[in-house]
Structures are given as C-alpha cells and as structure tokens.
Image (cartoon, rainbow, N blue to C red):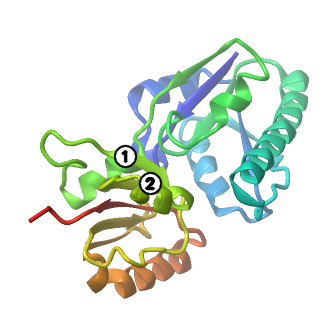
Amino acid sequence: MIRILGIGMGPQHVTPEVAEALRGCDYVVAAAKSDDDPLLAVRRRVCEAYGVELVVVPDPERDRDPAGDAGYVTAVRDWHAARVAAYRAVLEERRGTAGFLVWGDPSLYDSTIRVVSQLTDDYDVLPGISAPQLLAARHRIVLHPVGQPIHVTTARRLRDDVATGQRNLVVMLGADLELDGLEDWSIWWGANLGDPSEELVAGRVTTVRVEIDEARARAKAAAGWVMDLYLLRAPEAA
C-alpha cells in the first residue's frame, strides 16, 4: 500500500486527514537531490512530528537543458522511469505501507501520482494545501475577476499562453521573470510561502520587477532554496 500525501509547505500545513494517514504508515520514501538538500529537511520534520521513519533515496539525474517541448517531455519521462526503478527497489525490500510526501497538492504540477501508478495499483491520494491557495490567501485576493476564468501554467509556457489571449494566469515552476512587454500588467508574487523565509510583492510589473528580484534573492539566502509563483493579470480594457 502506498499513500500519496499532500503536505503544503511543511508541518504547519498538514491536515488532520493527512496526519492520521502518516501515523498509519510504516515509513516514508523521499528523494534527495543532494547530501544537504534543504527540502529533504522539511520532509524530515514532518516525519519526526508524526513518528514515521524517513527512507531517503538519491534522486536520479535529470536533463535540465532539453531542446524544445518534445525534449522536455522526453527528459521528464526518462527521469520518471529512473525514479520508478529506484523506488521499486526500496518498496520490494521493505514492504508495509509507504508514504510519499508531496509539496502543495498532488494534483498540481507534481508527478508523484504518475510515478506511483507505475509501481502499484494499491495507492490512495490525500489532498494538501496548494501554492496558488497560499498565494491568494497571503495577498488577500481572489484569483480571478468576477465571472472570469483563471489559467494555471508554467513559466516556460507563459509567452505562448499570453499569445493565445490568456489575461489572468497563475504562473508556476518559474525562475527568472520574463515579463518584457507586460509592464502594464498587475502581478501578485510570492516565494517560499508558509516558510519563515517567505517573501511577497505586489503591484504593476513595471514598478516591482526589481523589488521581486531582491525579494527572491533574500528568500534563497534565508532558506537555501526558493520556490516562487505569481498571479499575472492584464489591465482592464478601456
């Protein structure tokens, strides 16, 4: 049995449902990107809070510079296959009920479900607090105007999505802000939401771009890592 558990940004976001599931796990499996992976430390704190053993698996290497969308899909597929093999070795050795802790919510820009489904049909999924939820709460906003849609995308697809007419976007999995030509748009940005290193900036793109760069640098210096996202909204038509 495998339990895929959304944990938001750490122990403070673990729901009672997920907490109960954690207590019933024999161990938790987590990938480590390096010997001093700071995000692994957060997972460790969650396990310690609920008395569950953490089993660390070195994360397989991934091609970080693939050519085009097709190359990206291939790189991710290969990476997932390597993860499946690494996790299967642990699961076959230990048996019992294993937990996988997912940042935010398992339904949104995370592939744990895709990976686990290749390992077994015996798994369930419990939701967590997602990054867009936290972003909206921190900025005290609704993610969409009245009666309007919201488009959730990634930074690598932002330009294409804007070109197709999207005017209200939550942008995830970004690094550098590529916002040339969008200076009149409004942005609500956040990094490391829910962590002591959290940073927030909001305003017109043209006036806050430097402030965001500085805030992002502070978050990374404080935590050793940075995960950010933002809501980007076009100006209202005259």
**Nearer the viewer's eye, disc 2 or disc 1?**
2
The residue to which callout 2 is attached is: 161
Q: Is residue 182 left or right of residue 141?
A: right
Quarter of the rendering containing residue 206: bottom left
**Tag 2's secondary structure?**
helix
Residue 167 position, x and y percent, is 29, 56
Residue bearing the label numbered 1: 151
Please state, as top left, top right, bottom left or bottom right, where the N terminus lies in the image. top right
N-term mark: 2 or 1: 1
Q: Residue at x 48, y 38 (%)?
A: 105
Looking at the image, which residue is at 42% across and 74% down?
179
**Kind of residue at badge 1:** His
The extreme top residue here reads 122
Give the SS element for disc 1. strand
Q: Is residue 128 left or right of residue 169?
A: right
Q: Is residue 222 visible?
A: yes
Q: Callout 1: 10 Å neighbours few (<14), some, many (20+)?
A: some
Q: Position of residue 10 (x, y in %)?
A: 49, 49
